Image: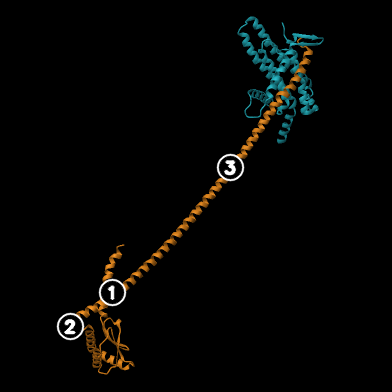
Amino acid sequence: MRLSPDEIIYWQQGWFKLNATLVFTWALILVLAVGARLVTRRLTTEHRRSRWQNLLEIVVTAIVQQIEEVGLPDARKYLGFLGTLFLFIAAASLCTVIPGFEPPTGSLSTTAALALCVLVAVPLFGISDQGLRGYLKSYIEPTVIMLPFNLISEVSRTLALAVRLFGNMMSGGMIIAILLTITPFIFPVIMTVLGLLTGMVQAYIFSILAAVYIAAATRNREPKTSLNQQESHG
Amino acid sequence: MLIDWFTVGAQVLNFLILVWLMKRVLYQPILDAIDAREARIAKELSEAAATQTAAEKTRDDFRQKNATFDQERAALLAKAAEEAKTERQRLFDAARLAADAQKAKRAESLKNEAADFNASLRHKAQTEVFAVARRTLADLATTSLEQRAAEVFMDRLRSLDPAAKDQFARAIKAAASPALVRSAFDLSLEQHAEIRRAVNETLSADVPLRFETAPDLVGGIELTTPGQTVAWSIAHYLDTLEKRVGDLIAEKSRPARAQP
C-alpha cells in the first residue's frame, strides 16, 4: 500500500528523484503564482473592482487580520511566511477534488520540510525582534532548569506539526481509497467533501500554530514591561 | 522510510520560492492596492469635508448677506415711507395753501365784482332815477327836477333849527372864502338868486356865495362852509336802494354757495 506520493517516482538519476510530491508541488506553485499574477496584473484602486481582485483582497486581509488577532501587531512582516504556509496547504487540500491529484502535503517529507521551515523561522523572527541575546534568554525563562524542556518543546512541536498535517492529509486520501474499494458510490464523495473541510482546518491549524510560535518568540519582552508598569503604578 | 531527505530539501527550497513568488505577485500588489484605495478614500473624505466646510461657509456668508440685505431693504422702505409721508404732508399743505389762496382770490374777485356791480348799479340807478324823476316831474308838474331840487334844498335850509343856523352863520363869518354851493346840474341865474335870497334869509346876513357844478353829487345841491354842510341829494335814497339791492344779492347767493 502506498502511503506517500514520494513513492511515485517518474525519473531518477542517482540521488536526484523526480517524484510526484515535487511535480505536484511545482504544479501548485505554478497555479498559485500564475493565478495571482493574472489577477494582480490589472489591479485597480477605484471603488469598482473585479471579483477576483475582491476575492484576493478578502483572502489577504483575512490572513492579516488572523495574524494580528494571534498577537502579532506588525502582521505584514509575517504575512509572506504565514500566509504562504496557509495558502499552500489550503490549495493542496482543495486540489484533492481533482482526480489523480496527489496532495504534496500527504507526504511526510513535505510536512517535515514545512515544519523545519517553521523551526527555523521562529528563532529568526525572534532574533530579529529582540536580538540574539534576548531570544536565547527566553530559553532559560523563568529558570535555567527550563532550558531542556524548552529545547524539547521546540523539537517536539515541530515534529507534531509535521506529523499532524501528514497524518490528516494521508488519512484523508487513504480513507477515500479504501472507501472506493468498498462502496464506490456516494460515500467517497461525502468523504471527499469532509476531506476538503479537514484540509482547510489543517491549513488553518498549521499556520495559526506557526503564528503562535512566532508570537511567543517575539513577545517575551512584553509581559516584563507590563509587569514593570504595574510595579511602578503600585 | 516515509521521509525522503532529498524531497525534504527540495520542498524547503520550493516553499521558499513560493514565499518569494507570493510576496511578489500577491501580497505586495494587493496590499499596495488596498493602501492606495484607503489613501484615496481618505483623500476624498478630506476633500469632501473641505468642500462641506466651504459650502457651510458659503451658506453662512449667504445667510449673513441675506440678513444684511433684508435689514437694508427694511431701512430703505422705512426711509422711503417716511419721505413719502413728509412729501405727502408737504404737498397737502401746499395744496391747502394754494386752495386757500385761490379761495381768498375768488372771494376778493367776488367782492370786487360785487363792488363793481354795485357801483355800476348805483350809477345806472342814479341816472335812471334821475331821468324818471325828471320825466315824471316834467309830465306831472310845470316845474323841472332841478327847480324842484333847488326848492327842496331851500326848504331844508329854511327849516334848520336855530342852533344849526347860528353854527352855520358863525362858520360863514369865520371863513375867509365865500361859501360854496355845489349842484349836480347847472343852476339858472334865477335859481342862483333864489338860493342866495334863501341863504340870506335863513342866516339873516349877506352871505357871499360861489356856485359850482359837481356831477358826483348825485342829483343834489349842497351848501358848504368849512366845518358845516347843508345838502339835499338823491344819494341818500340811492344809498338805501344800494343797501337793499346788496341785501337781495347776498340773500340770493347764499343758497347757491351753500349747495356745492
In the image, residue B31 lies at what x, y percent?
69, 27
Amino acid identity at mark 3: Glu
Residue A141, located in which quarter of the rendered image?
top right
Residue at image position (66%, 33%) is: B40
- Position of residue A118 relative to residue A8, above or below, is below
In the image, residue A206 lies at what x, y percent?
70, 19
Question: According to the colouring, which chain is cyan?
Answer: A
For the residues marked 2 and 3, what is the alpha-carbon distance in whole angstroms? 121 Å
Tag 2, which secondary structure? Answer: loop
- Residue sitting nearer the eye, A48 or B101: B101
For the residues marked 3 and 1, what is the alpha-carbon distance in whole angstroms? 93 Å
Question: Pointer 2: what residue?
Answer: B141
Chain containing the residue with disc 3: B
First reached walking from the N terminus: tag 2 or tag 3: 3
The colour chain B appears in is orange
Residue at image position (53%, 48%) is: B67
Tag 3, which secondary structure? Answer: helix
Residue at image position (32%, 73%) is: B116
Question: Pointer 3: what residue?
Answer: B56
Question: Pointer 1: what residue?
Answer: B121
Image marks 2 and 3: residues in contact by CB distance under 8 Å:
no
